[in-house]
Amino acid sequence: MSPRTPRPRLSRPATTAAALLALGLTLTACGGGGGTDTDADLGGATLEIVGPWAGAEQESFERVLSVFEQRTGATVQYSGAGDDLQTVLQTRIQGGDAPDVALIPQAGLIEHFAEEGALTPLSDDVVAALDENMAGAWTDIGSVDGTPYGVYLKVANKSLVWYNDPLFAETGAAPPETWEDFVELSENLSDVGVDPLSVAGADGWVLTDWFENVYLQTAGPQMYDQLAAHEIPWTDPSVEVALETIAEIWGQERLLAGGTDGTLQTDFPTSVVNVFSDDPEAAMVVGADFIGGVVADSTNSAVGDDARVFSFPYVAGEEGAVVVAGDAAVAMNDDEATMELLRFLAGPEAAGEWAALGGFLSPNRHLTADDYADPLTGQVAEQIVTAGDSVRFDLSDLQPAAFGATVGDGMWQTLQDFMADPSDVEGTMERLESEAAQAHGE
């Protein structure tokens, strides 16, 4: 459907838009400072970093590294390993040829390499920089058994819903604040002939993001931690509550673009294009801030204008909880140059350099709206910074890969099966528990 086609206006009052849209216009200044500018003389030192980034991400990161090189006289070489990062690092570690620094996108992988003895704990100076600059729980997120290993540089906000603003305007829809309002809005959109939600059911990780957001709110951060560590089983009543809540949406085929069968065949890029193409097939898509990149690359919609966001609707518990993901820099030796680089990456100068280039979010509390490339990015970053201790890392990324990050298996496949039959809450819980126990070696 074209967003220019007149539609009936929804009877539901547009009462929640003002506060949420206003959030996109400003980002409260957290104050300058940080005090972690690098001034060490590292002339002659050569550092190697291996990470997952390529293309525009690699180019932007190399801009950040050039600032460090200019300040210290060190030379830094970056190599991208893409999706083969774990294999590349494992092979090099076993061969006695580990890089100085690795960029790791999964918290569970940090734990894996730390337990193998491949990582070096952060020095006191780096930890001090983290304490001075990072918001909320980010130092803890990069720690294993209380020992800090990771400096999170580039992060993702996964507690967002993107919506087609012209389509909302034509139907009188307003961004909802609560889950109840979200369900009602979706039903009302369907009633006036607009498919509410485009969901990438073909990509299991998208479905884990839905579960994680609902579970974090309905169960709370502490139980979220317990489930992530498999200290409570997936048959716990808290999991039942989360699955039953999700089923309020997934169990109504009319709320899903393409129905259940179509949703399970929709991949992530298509789910975004479905909402923001010239002839949109749906009004909303749940997903992280990096959806903006798909909008910019694959549609004619303008991020921050046609494509806007609101926070994942409040379900229960503590408001403002945020699910995040991110890439952490970890040390594989305790050389002075290695730790000085990590101290630099923990500071506001490195974060500010990349923030100005775009396509970047930082957990650094010293950045303000003016540091980001656009107001929408400032809004999304603010949600991460202000969430404080209610920030939690993507639960599936905290799991052994066999359970949390494998196509056709574990969480991904089980939640796809649950989407196909949202009435099977008990069977879904039992399957998740069986696979989690096996993956954790229990």
Image (spheres, grey):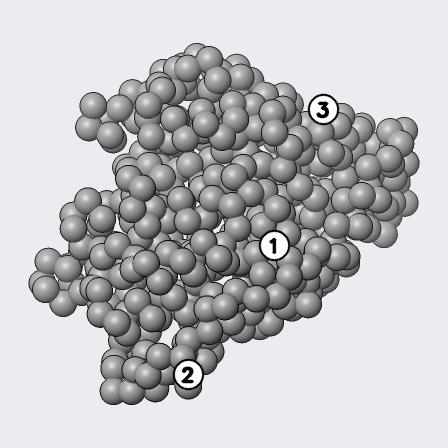
Relative to 236, say whether 147 is above or below.
below
The answer to whether residue 442 is visible is yes
Alpha carbon separation for disc pair 1 and 3: 26 Å
CB under 8 Å between discs 1 and 2? no
As helix, strand or loop, the secondary structure at mark 2 comes to helix
Alpha carbon separation for disc pair 2 and 3: 52 Å
Nearer-N-terminus badge (1/3): 3
For discs 2 and 3, the disc positioned in front in the rendered view: 2
Q: On residue 71, which mark appears?
A: 2
Residue type at numbered disc 1: Ala
Residue 403 picture quarter: top left
In percent of width and height, residue 158 lies at 54, 45
Between 326 and 277, the one nearer to me in the picture = 326
Residue type at numbered disc 2: Arg
In percent of width and height, residue 120 lies at 22, 57
Residue type at numbered disc 3: Glu
According to the picture, the residue beneath numbered tag 1 turns out to be 381
The answer to whether residue 200 is visible is no
Q: Number of numbered discs present?
A: 3
Residue at the location (58% across, 50% down)? 385
Which quarter of the rendered picture does the C terminus lie within?
A: top left
As helix, strand or loop, the secondary structure at mark 1 comes to helix
Alpha carbon separation for disc pair 1 and 2: 27 Å
Callout 1 crowding tier (Cα within 10 Å): few <14, some 14–19, many ≥20: many
In percent of width and height, residue 200 lies at 53, 41
As helix, strand or loop, the secondary structure at mark 3 comes to helix
Relative to 284, say whether 251 is above or below.
above
Residue at the location (42% across, 86% down)? 70
Q: On residue 180, which mark appears?
A: 3
Nearer-N-terminus badge (2/3): 2
Between 44 and 258, the one nearer to me in the picture = 44
